[in-house]
Amino acid sequence: NVVNAENLALAHDGVIIINTSRGGLVDEKALYDAVKSGKVQMAGLDVMASEVFDPKNPLVGLPQVIQTPHAAYYSEESTI
């Protein structure tokens, strides 16, 4: 939970959060609150705290949040 409520409060308004590393780095509750308040303009998440997709996760379906199945890196160029 490196990206938590305390650290998000220190960020500039309208910050964009991108996580392609490990799901546990982002406190998803704090991110949800920050997105809803407008503190976070957008979030791109290639990983989530749970490796199994949870349709009940409050981040699911938010128009400001893009989620990918930890395969966003994959392209023909990345395999060369």
Image (cartoon, rainbow, N blue to C red):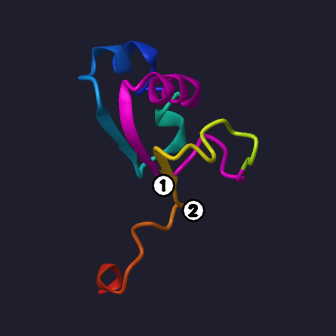
Residues rendered magenta in the picture: 28-53
Q: Which residue is mark 1?
A: 46
Neighbours of disc 1 within 10 Å: few (<14), some (14-19), many (20+): some
- Foreground residue, 23 or 63? 63
Question: Which kind of residue does numbered mark 1 sit on?
Answer: Asp
Above or below residue 23? Residue 5 is above
- Sequence-wise first label, 1 or 2: 1
x and y, in percent, of residue 20 in the image: 41, 52
Q: Is residue 74 covered in magenta?
A: no
- Image x and y of residue 31, in percent: 49, 29
Q: Are marks 1 and 2 in contact (CB under 8 Å)?
A: yes
Q: Residue at x 39, y 68 (%)?
A: 73
Residue assigned mark 2: 69
Magenta-colored stretch includes residue 37: yes
Q: Amino acid at mark 2?
A: Pro
User: Is disc 2 placed on a helix, strand or loop?
Assistant: loop
Relative placement, left or right, of 48 versus 74 is right
Within-10-Å neighbours for mark 2: few <14, some 14–19, many 20+: few
Q: Residue at x 76, y 41 (%)?
A: 56
Query: The C terminus lies in which quarter of the figure?
Result: bottom left
- Disc 1 element: loop
Number of callouts: 2
Q: Residue at x 36, y 36 (%)?
A: 41
Residue 18 horizontal side relative to residue 37, left or right: left
Residue 28 point in image, percent of width and height: 56, 31
Residue found at x 53% / y 27%: 27
User: Label for residue 57?
Assistant: none
Distance between mark 1 and mark 2 Cα atoms = 6 Å
Above or below: residue 28 compared with residue 6: below
Q: In the rendering, at what x and y percent does residue 55 appear?
A: 74, 48
Residue 56 relative to residue 26: left or right: right
Give the vertical position of 31 relative to 65 (above or below): above
